[in-house]
Image (tube, helix red, strand yellow):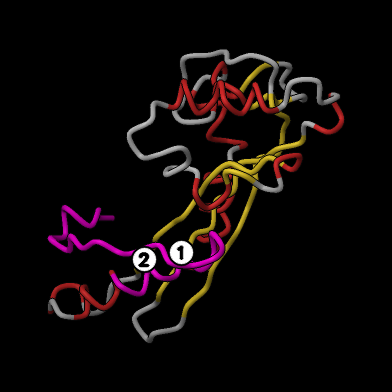
Amino acid sequence: ILSMKEAGLETEVDETGTSFEENSLLKAKAIAEKAAEKEEYKDAIVLADDSGFEVDYLNGEPGIYSARYMGTDTPYSIKNQSIIDRMQGVPELKRSARFVAAIACVFPDGKCEVIRDTFEGRVAYEAKGIYGFGYNPIMYVPEKGCNSGELLPEEKNKISHRGKALMKIRELMK
């Protein structure tokens, strides 16, 4: 398993899709095209993901714009507080949110598959935790009784959107 950088396949891909699935597929196809140009990677299986945070009450925001939400240079502490502020007064049952991961897989024969999975929870009333990054401090996980940012990485990886999607991709590759 190699990263793009390790394989010398660095490329910028414009995320012009309208869904996590479209964006992950755009990235995977672009990287697969670059890989096919190199003899040592002509039979490579290429994986790429697109992921983000969706808040139902906010019509799915920040969604596919999660990394660019409120500007790419805006710290997540400010982004997170903005979401908490916008959710002020919203009752518990209407605070549903999720992390989404869509992982695209391009096989050497050109066949493409995209797997999507989620990590469900609610927007917390305050940011908590030091683990993870991005929106983890404001994602309350009811079955764990804490925010995602409070979960140890090993524990979160077992139930996360990306972890579940990768397990499904692993089965596909078998």
Residue plotted at (36% across, 74% down): 29
In this view, the residue farthest toward the bottom is: 109
In the rendered image, residue 14 lying in the magenta stretch gets the answer yes
Q: Nearer the viewer, residue 152 or 90?
A: 90
Residue drawn at point x = 49 percent, y = 59 percent: 103
Q: CA distance from mark 2 to mark 1?
A: 6 Å
Give 7 or 91, whichever is nearer the viewer.
91
One can see residue 174 in this view: no
**Quadrant location of the N terminus?**
bottom left
User: Is residue 88 left or right of 134 when viewed as pictured?
Assistant: right
Query: Which amino acid type corresponds to the residue marked 1 in the rendered image?
Result: Asn
Percent x, y of residue 18? 54, 65
Where residue 31 sits in the image (x, y, percent)? 28, 69
On screen, residue 85 versus residue 103, left or right, reads: right
- Confirm or deny contact between disc 2 and disc 1 (CB under 8 A): yes
Q: Is residue 143 above or below residue 8?
A: above
Q: Is residue 124 visible?
A: yes
Q: Quadrant of residue 92?
A: top right
Q: Which residues are magenta?
A: 1-30
Left or right? Give the position of 67 relative to 156: left
Mark 1 packing: few (<14 Cα in 10 Å), some, or many (20+)? many
Q: Secondary structure at mark 2?
A: helix
Disc on res. 23: 1
> Which residue is under mark 2?
27
Name which quarter of the figure residue 44 lies in.
bottom left
Mark 2: amino acid: Lys
The residue depicted at 15 percent of the width and 80 percent of the height is: 37
Q: Position of residue 116 (x, y in %)?
A: 60, 58
Residue 6 placement, left or right of 91:
left
Tell me if residue 144 comes above or below residue 30 in the rendering.
above
